[in-house]
Image (cartoon, rainbow, N blue to C red):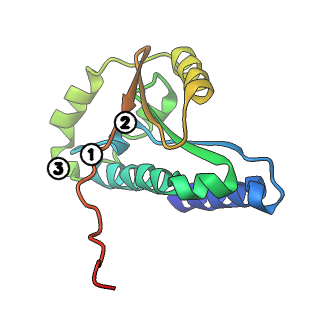
């Protein structure tokens, strides 16, 4: 499923690219909050969603935006009251420890799909290239990642 999102994003970027006759625009990828930090209950799913967030942020590189006119943003909804949450039972990473995690998981406050949808629309309307938004229980929080590494330039040339 992850490769489908990546393939679709690249295909959309190809068609929207202003330097190739497209009209530019916005690509908004959805990556749930478990893609913002490690999640012990669903480690593999969390890792995949972290990858999607990094992929989207990477394509939002300012030089790409300058040429393509395509803004890329990541929207990270919190737990939303849909059947998707119920379908994850039995898919825990370490199933032998699933029960205590499931008890904790059941206590997490869930937002309504309507509230989530309203925040998605608002985020798309106000976002700038590269924005990452956490959309949780009616609150929108812009996520800013710290830069840990920058390449050192060779000044001897």
Q: Name the mark on residue 74.
A: none
Q: Nearer the viewer, residue 142 or 137?
A: 142
- Circle 2 crowding by C-alpha within 10 Å: few under 14, some 14–19, many from 20: many
Question: Along the polypeptide, which appears first: circle 3 or circle 2?
Answer: 2
- Circle 1 crowding by C-alpha within 10 Å: few under 14, some 14–19, many from 20: few
Residue corresponding to mark 2: 33
Tell whether label 1 touches label 2 (CB within 8 Å): no
Q: Name the mark on residue 96.
A: 3
Q: Is residue 55 above or below residue 124?
A: below
Q: Residue at x 57, y 25 (%)?
A: 126
Q: Residue at x 26, y 29 (%)?
A: 105
Left or right, 108 with reference to 75: left
Left or right, 64 with reference to 91: right
Tell whether label 2 touches label 3 (CB within 8 Å): no
Residue 123 lies, in percent from the top left, at 55, 26
Gap between marks 1 and 3, in whole Å?
35 Å
Residue 38 lies, in percent from the top left, at 24, 46
Residue corresponding to mark 1: 146
Q: Is residue 38 above or below residue 143?
A: below
Residue 87 lies, in percent from the top left, at 44, 38
Tell whether label 3 touches label 1 (CB within 8 Å): no
Mark 2: secondary structure: helix
Q: Nearer the viewer, residue 102 or 43?
A: 43
Q: Nearer the viewer, residue 7 or 83?
A: 7
Q: Is residue 48 visible?
A: yes
Q: Nearer the viewer, residue 148 or 38?
A: 148
Mark closer to the observer (2, 1):
1
Check the picture and name the quadrant holding the C terminus: bottom left
């Amino acid at each position: 499923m992850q490769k489908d999102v990546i393939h679709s994003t690249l295909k959309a970027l190809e068609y929207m690219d202003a330097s190739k006759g497209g009209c530019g625009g916005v690509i908004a990828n959805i990556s749930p909050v478990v893609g913002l930090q490690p999640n012990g209950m669903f480690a593999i799913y969390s890792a995949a969603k972290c990858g999607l967030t990094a992929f989207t942020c990477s394509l939002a590189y300012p030089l790409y935006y300058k040429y393509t006119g395509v803004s890329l943003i990541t929207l990270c909804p919190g737990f939303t009251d849909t059947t998707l949450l119920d379908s994850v039972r039995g898919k825990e990473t370490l199933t032998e420890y699933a029960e205590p995690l499931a008890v904790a998981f059941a206590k997490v406050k869930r937002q309504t799909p309507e509230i989530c949808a309203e925040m998605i629309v608002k985020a798309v309307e106000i976002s700038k290239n590269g924005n990452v938004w956490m959309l949780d229980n009616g609150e929108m929080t812009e996520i800013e990642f710290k830069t840990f590494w920058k390449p050192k330039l060779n000044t001897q040339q």
